[in-house]
């Protein structure tokens, strides 16, 4: 077989047929993965391979939705696409979500242009528009993407749950779909990851307090450790919990506008009240 | 969007009405509904609603909008203070540890 070119049979299929299809249903593994990243486990490496994906049976007239390659973002998008036939173009944002990546320019004009070219999007769809999440607008200049690729970016709603309504209304978002909100339920979701963020520092401090409590003028007394360290340990723990759980969840209800005063009130008064 | 206001009179957002063509892109991309259109020109409804994300100026074809946008990340601002640099959360591949 020397000198014979090796042909991968997959290369003979039409371009669109080679694109992987993803489900709109999240399975147990997706949900476990989401739970783990919410607790900060493997959060820095929860990424999707960038590129084009199918949802349902899209054809050359189907919509193209652009997403970040953070798996939590990707899952949030696809679970809201039930009964739709669309393409998802995942761009490489280093596994960072849409809003954060846009702020740094990573979910940005150049990256979208590159992804459109890499995916040969002009051969996949006959129309020339792509749907972008609204919160990518701080990184993406729509007119520049149009100039460089011929594809016209349309900014969709802020939240993936409104995409169906947006497409159904002929690419029209209501004013409510265009606004960000940060209600208590969403703020509470951030508690576990913040709690885990400084866990080692917390443990080191608590352990040091515990050990130092054994010190006595006569030497080191093991019997003294519990009695002396109990109150300081409880105190540090409650301050940690106040800062990470109570402050974000009850932020609008904590008095004072200045952040420093809010923090002082939240962290020092709430644990004792 | 009054609920999203924090400090008064600190926003760097500026709109040059002479350059504005009234295309409405700023109205569309702003997540805090800062802009409206009146008489064929964009108008700032309440400047204190602005959080300086930069979406409007980034998508203004004629350069009629200026805003000093940051990275939009509290961890980035703290990093900036600690390192004496511009705010950066450094969410790049080689440096995941500093990411917000």
Image (cartoon, grey):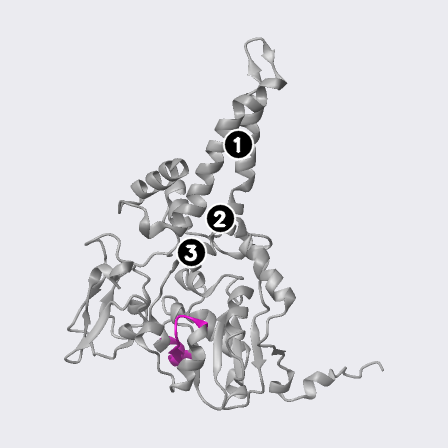
Q: Nearer the viewer, mark 3 or mark 1?
A: 3
Residue A262, given in percent of the width and then of the height, sits at 32, 43
Q: Which residue is mark 3?
A: A187
**Crowdedness near tag 1: few (<14), some (14–19) or many (≥20) residues, C-alpha within 10 Å:** few
On whether disc 2 and disc 3 are found on a single subunit, the reply is yes
Tell me the magenta residue range. A144-160
On whether disc 1 and disc 2 are found on a single subunit, the reply is yes
User: Judging from the image, what secondary structure is the residue with disc 1 in?
Assistant: helix
Q: Residue at x 48, y 63 (%)?
A: A97
Q: Chain of mark 3?
A: A
Q: Which residue is mark 1?
A: A205
Which numbered disc, 3 or 1, marks the residue that appears first in the sequence? 3
**Crowdedness near tag 3: few (<14), some (14–19) or many (≥20) residues, C-alpha within 10 Å:** some
Q: Is residue B42 above or below residue A35?
A: below
Distance in Å between CA atoms under marks 3 and 1? 27 Å
Q: Which residue is mark 2?
A: A194
Q: Quadrant of the C terminus of chain A?
A: top left
Q: Residue at x 23, y 61 (%)?
A: B13
Q: Taking the image as drawn, is residue A151 in sight?
A: no
User: Judging from the image, what secondary structure is the residue with disc 3 in?
Assistant: helix
Q: Residue at x 58, y 81 (%)?
A: A54
Distance in Å between CA atoms under marks 2 and 3? 11 Å
Pick whichever, B11 or A220, lies toward us: A220
Distance in Å between CA atoms under marks 1 and 2? 17 Å
Residue A190, given in percent of the width and then of the height, sits at 47, 54
């Amino acid at each position: 077989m020397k000198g014979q070119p090796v042909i991968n049979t997959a290369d003979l299929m039409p371009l669109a047929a080679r694109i992987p299809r993803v489900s709109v249903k999240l399975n147990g593994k997706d949900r476990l993965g989401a739970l783990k990243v919410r607790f900060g486990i493997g959060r820095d490496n929860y990424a999707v391979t960038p590129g084009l994906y199918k949802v349902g049976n899209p054809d050359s007239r189907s919509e193209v939705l652009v997403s970040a390659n953070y798996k939590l973002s990707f899952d949030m998008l696809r679970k809201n696409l039930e009964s739709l036939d669309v393409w998802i173009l995942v761009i490489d944002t280093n596994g960072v979500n849409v809003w954060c990546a846009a702020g740094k320019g990573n979910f940005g004009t150049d990256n979208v242009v590159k992804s459109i070219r890499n995916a040969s999007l002009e051969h996949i769809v006959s129309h020339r528009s792509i749907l972008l999440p609204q919160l990518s607008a701080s990184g993406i200049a729509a007119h520049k993407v149009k100039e460089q690729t011929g594809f016209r970016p349309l900014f969709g709603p802020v939240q993936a749950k409104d995409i169906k309504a947006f497409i159904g209304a002929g690419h029209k978002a209501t004013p409510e779909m265009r606004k960000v909100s940060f209600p208590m339920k969403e703020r509470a979701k951030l508690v576990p990851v913040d709690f885990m963020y400084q866990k080692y520092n917390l443990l080191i401090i608590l352990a040091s307090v515990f050990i130092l409590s054994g010190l006595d003028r006569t030497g080191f007394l093991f019997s003294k450790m519990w009695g002396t360290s109990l109150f300081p340990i409880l105190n540090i723990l409650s301050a940690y919990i106040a800062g990470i759980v109570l402050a974000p969840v009850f932020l609008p209800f904590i008095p004072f506008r200045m952040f420093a005063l809010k923090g002082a009130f939240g962290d020092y008064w709430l644990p004792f009240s | 969007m009054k609920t999203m206001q924090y400090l008064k009179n600190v926003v760097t957002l500026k709109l040059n009405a002479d350059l504005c063509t009234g295309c409405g892109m700023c109205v569309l991309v702003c997540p805090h509904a800062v802009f409206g259109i009146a008489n064929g020109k964009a108008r700032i409804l309440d400047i204190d609603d602005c959080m300086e994300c930069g979406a409007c100026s980034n998508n203004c074809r004629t350069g009629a909008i200026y805003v000093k946008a940051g990275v939009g990340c509290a961890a980035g601002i703290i990093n900036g203070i600690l390192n004496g640099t511009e705010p950066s959360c450094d969410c790049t591949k080689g440096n995941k540890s500093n990411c917000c």
